[in-house]
Amino acid sequence: MISTTRVHRWVAGVDDDLRYSSEGLLDTDGMMGPWYAGDRPRSVDELANTPDSFVLLAPGGAGKTTVIEELRSREPGAVSVDLKMAGPEGLPAMFERAVANADVVYVDAIDEAVAAGSQVNYQESPVDR
């Protein structure tokens, strides 16, 4: 069952040139008008079921986990991996299980794992899909 809850958060590419209000907030009203021709943020809702890979970058407490769990709930066969739940030696096994048993894998707590000193490294292994 797909959730009908709308996550009111916005995402944009790292290189996007976005408009901000005088208070430094995202000017979604100005950028969403039909006349606007520049880069536009997308609703987080649009990330569900996308074929693209992406990373959510935001300060602690901004709601990355909320977004990940909402997106995971919208995609059958998706799982989320919380990096806080495994030490460095447990990460490879955690990722192998997730990739073997899911169509989509959301990785959460990257910032917290790095801040805690975990050795989160990129590993490449063959995936038979």
Image: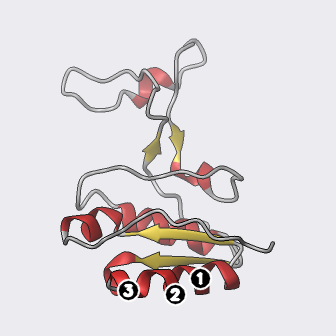
Task: Depth check: give the residue in front, 29 or 97.
Answer: 97
> At x 35% / y 65%, what residue is drawn?
110
Quarter of image, res 77: bottom right
Q: Quadrant of the C terminus?
A: bottom right
Rendered-image quadrant of the N terminus? bottom right
In the figure, 54 relative to 27: above or below? Answer: below
Q: Amino acid at mark 1?
A: Glu
Residue type beneath disc 3: Glu
Q: For the residues labelled 2 and 1, say whether their Cβ atoms are less than 8 Å apart.
A: yes
Q: Residue at x 43, y 21 (%)?
A: 17
Q: Which residue is mark 1?
A: 96
In the image, residue 21 sits, relative to residue 42, either above or below, namely: above
Q: What amino acid type should be assigned to the residue bearing mark 2? A: Ala
> Of 91 and 61, which appears nearest the observer?
91
Pointers 3 and 2 in contact (C-beta within 8 Å): no
According to the picture, the residue beneath numbered tag 2 turns out to be 93
Q: Residue at x 38, y 68 (%)?
A: 65
Residue bearing the label numbered 3: 89
Residue 56 circle label:
none
x and y, in percent, of residue 14 in the image = 44, 34
Q: Left of 116 or right of it: where is 37?
A: right
Q: Secondary structure at mark 2?
A: helix
For residue 63, above or below residue 35 = below
Q: CA distance from mark 3 to mark 1?
A: 13 Å
Q: Would residue 6 appear left or right of 57 to someone viewing this image?
A: right
Residue density around tag 2, few if under 14, some if 14–19, many if 20 or more, within 10 Å:
few
Name the residue rendered at 25%, 68% in the picture.
112
